[in-house]
Amino acid sequence: MGSDVHQTDQSKLIQTVMEKLTAQNQTIAFATDFLTNFATDLIDREASFAGLFVAPTDDAKNAMFDIPYQILNANGSQSEETTIWMARQAKAVLRTNYAIAITRNSGQHTIWIAIVDQTGHERSCSIPFYRTQNVEDKVFNKAFELVQQSFEK
């Protein structure tokens, strides 16, 4: 039962953030380097959801987000720097108020999350994970937590 309650709390947070964005006529974009059911589920349901980029390779990140190969090579394609760059570019390309970017580095067991809010303020954090864990819900909950925090500024 505990995990059901936690799951419900996560769903409520995401729903609250999406409703607030819709009520304020604001939009949000997503960028990730892995396929996710969560983001694709939002496409049809939420008016404030502007789009989703999936860029699993360095070439895709370079082409979609104009991230120079020097940045990708120096920092890694699943680094904090790359994730922030993806969020910035997703927001700019789709002209949204907010953007969330998520990258998953399996070798380092780290997921990076970055958001850019309507003022251009950037936030990022990392979440550890292991291959046996399904962390998608936790990751998206944390991403929406960051967006919610930007409402409070």
Image: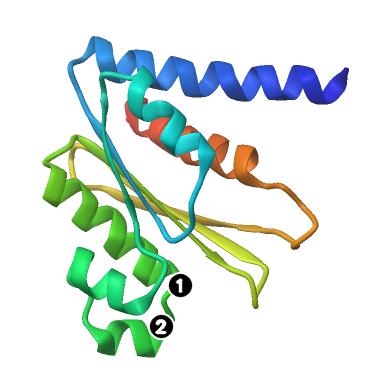
Quarter of image, res 104: bottom right
- The residue at 20%/37% (across/down) is 118
Q: Counting other residues with Cα less than 10 Å from the Cα at mark 1, is it few (<14), some (14-19), or many (20 or more)?
A: many
Quarter of image, res 56: bottom left
Locate residue 24, reporting x and y percent. 21, 14
Q: CA distance from mark 1 to mark 2?
A: 6 Å
Locate residue 62, reporting x and y percent. 24, 75
Q: Which residue is mark 1?
A: 79
| Residue 101 sits above or below residue 43 on the image | below
Kindly state the secondary structure of the residue where label 1 is placed. Answer: loop
- The residue at 63%/71% (across/down) is 106
Kindly state the secondary structure of the residue where label 2 is placed. Answer: helix
| Residue 49 sits above or below residue 15 on the image | below
**106, 98: nearer the viewer:** 106
| Left or right: 84 in relation to 127 | left
- The residue at 37%/89% (across/down) is 74
| Residue 33 sits above or below residue 51 on the image | below
Image marks 1 and 2: residues in contact by CB distance under 8 Å? yes
Looking at the image, how many numbered discs can be counted on the residues?
2
Locate residue 4, reporting x and y percent. 78, 20
Amino acid type, residue under disc 1 in the picture: Ser
Amino acid type, residue under disc 2 in the picture: Asn
In the rendered structure, find residue 75 and report the number of the disc placed on it.
2
| Residue 65 sits above or below residue 93 on the image | below
